[in-house]
Amino acid sequence: MRHDLLVDVLHVISNAEKTGKRACVVPASSLVKDVLKVLQKELYIGKFEFIDDGKSGRLEIQLVGKINKSRAVKPRLPVKRNEYEKWETRYLPAKDFGLLIISTSKGVMTQKEAVKAGLGGRLLAYVY
């Protein structure tokens, strides 16, 4: 039984990257798809494709070998629009290295996009 699908998906991706796999298959959800779109846009993963299995479906993700660590943040912490630097220093190893993934009222985006838009939100995950 899965309690948090995003946590499971990011662990699968991280473990597959560590073992040198070129692809992995994970369960699908709308939040997972949104997070994967952000990762794809930032070139951390390649293409991903939905596979219908008659239930919720699965996503096949092409890996490019750029992820050192990817983790979800539990609990989903609230972030104000002027607090991103505090969370970057807590979760990322260096300034401008990696990204925080934020759920905002305008959708799922990186901390850089949220700063440009002047939005706060909930901290979902970090990747570097």
Image: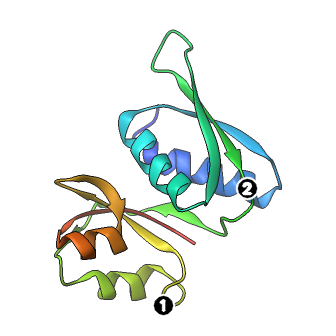
Q: Where, by quadrant of the figure, is residue 65 drawn?
A: bottom right
- Give the residue type at disc 1: Lys
* Residue 75 visible to an observer of this rendering: yes
Residue at image point 81% right, 48% down: 21
Of 46 and 67, nearer the camera is 46
Residue at image point 65% right, 57% down: 14
Kindly state the secondary structure of the residue where label 2 is placed.
loop
Q: CA distance from mark 2 to mark 1?
A: 23 Å
| Residue 126 in the image: above or below residue 47 | below
Query: Residue under circle 2?
Result: 64
Query: Residue under circle 1?
Result: 95
Residue at image point 41% right, 88% down: 89
Residue at image point 53% right, 75% down: 98
Q: Where, by quadrant of the figure, is residue 109 drawn?
A: bottom left
| Residue 90 in the image: above or below residue 127 | below
Image location of residue 67, percent across then percent down:
65, 65
* Residue 4 visible to an observer of this rendering: no
Q: Is residue 100 left or right of residue 57?
A: left
Q: Which mark is residue 51?
A: none
